[in-house]
Amino acid sequence: MLQSLYAKNLALIEEIQVEFETGLNILSGETGAGKSIILGCINLALGQRANKDIIRDGATYGFVELNFTIKSEKTKQLLAEEDIYTDEDSLVLSRKILENKSISKINGETVTLAQLKAVSALLIDIHGQHEHQSLLKKKNHEAIVDAYIGDEASLLKEEIKTLYTSFTKTKENLCDLINNREQKERELELLEFEVQEIEEASLKKKEDETLEKEFSFMTHAKTIKESLSLSYELTGEGESNASELISRAIKSLQESERYDNTLRPLLTQLLDIDGLLSDFNREINEYKSTLEFSAEDFIATENRLNEINRLKAKYGDSIEHIYEEKERKKTQIYEIYHTDERIEKLKKEVGKLQLELEEKALKLSALRKEQSKLLENDIETQIKDLNFEDTNFKIEILKMKDVTIQGIDQIEFKISLNPGEPLRPLAEIASGGELSRIMLAVKTVLAKKDEIETLIFDEIDVGISGRTAQKVAEKMALIGRTHQVIAITHLPQITAMADHHYLIEKRANKRKTTTKIHKLNKEGSILELARMTGGTRVTENVIQSAVEMKELAIKKKKSMEE
C-alpha cells in the first residue's frame, strides 16, 4: 500500500508530506484548491511524462517521493522479475524534475522511465477522470476478460505471442522464397561464373602482399642500380675513388711507421678500413647482379597483381575476404538448387506452427468463454448495486477468421439498461456517468482478482448524484475493506464513507499561492462534509445533517464487515 507522499516545488505545491492509511482515503476540497495537482504528483512519481512547467516558479527543480509497504509475496516476486527488491517490505519511488531532464530512482537506485512504469503498474491502479471512456473500445474488453482470468490467460497469451511471431516470420520467409524463386534462378548463372572466376585465379594466402613487394622492387630497380653504381664508382672503381685514396694513405703511413713505431695503431685502423671497403665493394657487385630480371618477369608480376586487385575490388578488400565471398556465393548456389526442398520444408513448418497456434488460441478462447460467464454475473451484480437495477449485461465472444497475436476472439461488452430493450454495445447507449459506474463495477470485480493493493479514483463521481451517488459511495467503501482506496471527490455521499479524510486547500497571500493538504479529525471531517452539503452557509442544521450522514455511513460500513 501507499504509505506516504512527499512533494516539493511542483506547481502550487511548495512542500507537502501526507501519510495515507488502509481502507478508504478521501481527498476533498473546493474547486481550484489543487486536488488534481496532488494526483499529478503521484502520476509523476509513477513515470508520467514531465513538463518543465510543472516546476514551481522560482525553483530550480521539482521533487516527488512515494513510499510503499509491500506485503504480498506475489508482488515481491513480480518486482524481482524486474530486478527490483524491497528493503524490509519498503519500496521508495522518487523523481527529480529538472529543466531539461528528470532523474528517477527506486530505493535510491537510478532507473529508466520504462523500469519505473513497469514497477508502478504492480503497485497502483489509477482510475482517471476519463478512463471510463476506454470501455468504448472493444480491445479493452478483451483485456478486462483476460485480467479476470489471471495467470492462466497470461501464460496462454504469452505462448500465443511466441507462436504467432514464429508463424508470421516463417510464413514471410516462405512467401519471399516463392516470390523470389525466378529472380534467384536468373542470378544463378552469374553466381556460378563468379565462383569459377575466383577458383580459377588460384589465389594463395598473402600472395598480394608478396607481389606488391616484388612489384615495388622491380619498379624501382633502375633507381637502385644507378644508386649502387655511383656508390661503387666513388668507393672502388672511378678516378680518385675511396679505395685508391686509402691505398695511397696506407703506403704513406707505412713509410712513416718505419721511423716511428707508435704510428702502428693508426696504420692498423687504416688497413681495417681498406678491408671493410673492399668487402663493401664486393657486396655491392653481388647485389647488383640480383637486379637483373627480364621484362617478361616484370609484366607477369604486374599482370598478376592487377588481377588480384581486380578481384579484391569486386569481392573483398583482401584474399581472405575474397574466399569468404566465394563460400557465401556457393551457399547461395546450393540454396537455389535446393529451393523446392526449402519451400516444402517451410510449408511443413508453417503448417505445424499454424496448428499449434490455432490449438493454443482455441484453448484460450474456451477459457475466455467459460470464465466470461462468471465475469458477466459478477459485473452485472456489481452494476445492479450501483443503481442499475433492471440492467442486463453480457459478454459477446465471436470467433474471428484468423488467429492474431491476441488469440482468435473478438470480445465485446453489451448491455441493456432498461427492461425490454435489446442488448447493444456500450458505445451506443451508455452516457459518461453510466460508463463511469460500469467501470467502477469492473474495477470492483477485478480488485478481488489482482494483487495490486492500492486503487486511486479521480472524481469517478462526475455526472452522478442522489441515490446513485450513495450506491457508488457504498461500493467504494466495500472495495476499501480489501484494498487501500484513495479517492478524489466532490460528493458528500462518498466523503461521508471515508475511513480517513484529507482536506486540500489553496492558500494565498500577496507574495505567493500554495496548495496544502492535511488529515482531518472527526470534527474537521464533519465541518468539511457540512461545507460540501451547505455551500457558503454552514448553519447548525447543516452541521447536524453532516453528523447524521457520517453516523449513517459508519453504520453502513460496520454492516459490511458482518
Image (cartoon, helix red, strand yellow):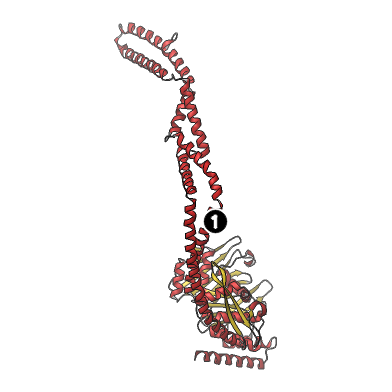
Q: Residue 470 lies in what quarter of the image?
A: bottom right
Q: Position of residue 505 (x, y in %)?
A: 63, 78
**Identity of the amino acid at label 1?**
Cys
Give the camera-side residue of 210 and 526.
210
- Name the residue located 63 percent from the left edge and 68 percent from the top edge: 56
Q: Which residue is mark 1?
A: 175
Q: Residue 444 lies in what quarter of the image?
A: bottom right
Q: Position of residue 156 (x, y in %)?
A: 48, 70
Whether residue 160 can be seen here: yes
Whether residue 1 can be seen here: no
Q: Secondary structure at mark 1?
A: helix
Give the camera-side residue of 515 and 3.
3
Q: Is residue 459 left or right of residue 185?
A: right
Q: Position of residue 421 (x, y in %)?
A: 66, 85
Q: Position of residue 72 (x, y in %)?
A: 45, 76
Q: Is residue 434 left or right of residue 379?
A: right
Label 1, residues with CA under 10 Å away: few <14, some 14-19, many ≥20:
some
- Name the residue located 44 percent from the left edge and 9 percent from the top edge: 240
